[in-house]
Image (tube, rainbow, N blue to C red):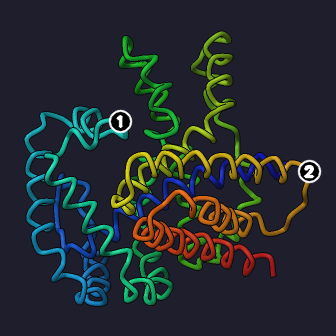
Amino acid sequence: MQMKWMGVAALIIGSISLVISLYVVGMASGLRSDVAEEKALSADAKIKLDLMLDETNKLNSSLASLSDQLREAVAKIDELESEQQIQQEISLENIESFLPEEMMDSIKESMGEIFDSEELSSTFTDMMGSMAEVFDSPEMIEMSAKMQVNMQYGDYLAMFADDPARQEEIRSILMEHAMEQSANVFSMMSGDEEGEFSFEDMADVTPVSELLADVLTPEELAEYEVYEEGNTARMMRQSFDMQMSMMAGGISPEGQQLIGDIYMEEWQIMVDGMADSSNPQPMMDTVNLYEQVLARSAEYLTETEYTQFESYVDYQQTILSQFDFMNDDEEQ
């Protein structure tokens, strides 16, 4: 039973961690983009964003040129014909080809500066509380759910490309499920005790396979279950690779690939151990996982690469510790 909810929690936290990472990038760069009017943040959320931005003003000097370059990327997105085309253009596989090479280099360089900053590290824990209030909003919940669905089920949905109507029907079911899960996690982040939802409660949430049973044939459902078997590991690797590219761009591609391989090896060891364990603090196991990856990677990295990866590990541990702390509060 624990493995079931642990897998769900890992998938959701993976997508939420990406949302947080992207949010910090936008906050540090001062980027304010309204890609579509219906997706604009509420006035109250924007006020909170501006207040949080004040906390990172000291970082802005190193990001002046990056801000202009990101606006160029937003302008390019605005030229695309539809939201579907945007989703096709911006994917994990081709995000670097979507942006000019010099822009990606600048983004990666600036991300390294951001996450090497002691100032951001020292204020991140305090920022999480304020950020959680912003995340617990329909806009952020939808953003997280879309990222989760695209990462988890993008390849599966592509199987229905010849039948757009069915593809959209299946996507809607997946989105509804993902939004419910994300809303529960964001609610925990904001300290909302009304629902009293914990990660263990995810074991009682209706499985996606049951939700899809009404729209899939028995053969299609069997194919989905095969796809789902490797879904957790697949998304964990995608999420890790994407965040490494964003936050540790100073590490060589070969180094990032090696670290990713070590991460997945340690992750599988952790998961296998949980299968025979009643560990009350599974999130802390994930925190310790990063320590193992850092230790094993040390001999393969230069001093500069190690320092950057260490900063990335500190960042991830802060996020995971926050989730574990909230879960402990709910159990008391």
The percent coordinates of residue 117 (x first, y second) are 36, 82
Residue at disc 1, secondary structure: loop
Q: How many marks?
A: 2
Identify the residue shown where x is 29% and y is 78%: 49
Residue labelled with disc 1? 93
- 70 left or right of 184 in image: left
Identify the residue shown where x is 39% and y is 73%: 134
- 179 left or right of 113 in image: right
Q: Nearer the viewer, residue 215 or 13?
A: 13
Q: Nearer the viewer, residue 92 or 190?
A: 92
Identify the residue shown where x is 53% and y is 69%: 313
Residue labelled with disc 2? 276
Disc 1 residue type (three-letter): Glu
- 247 left or right of 13 in image: left
The percent coordinates of residue 202 (x first, y second) are 71, 53
Give the spatial CA distance, label 1 vs label 2.
36 Å
Q: Is residue 287 above or below residue 211?
A: below
| Residue 302 visible to an observer of this rendering | yes
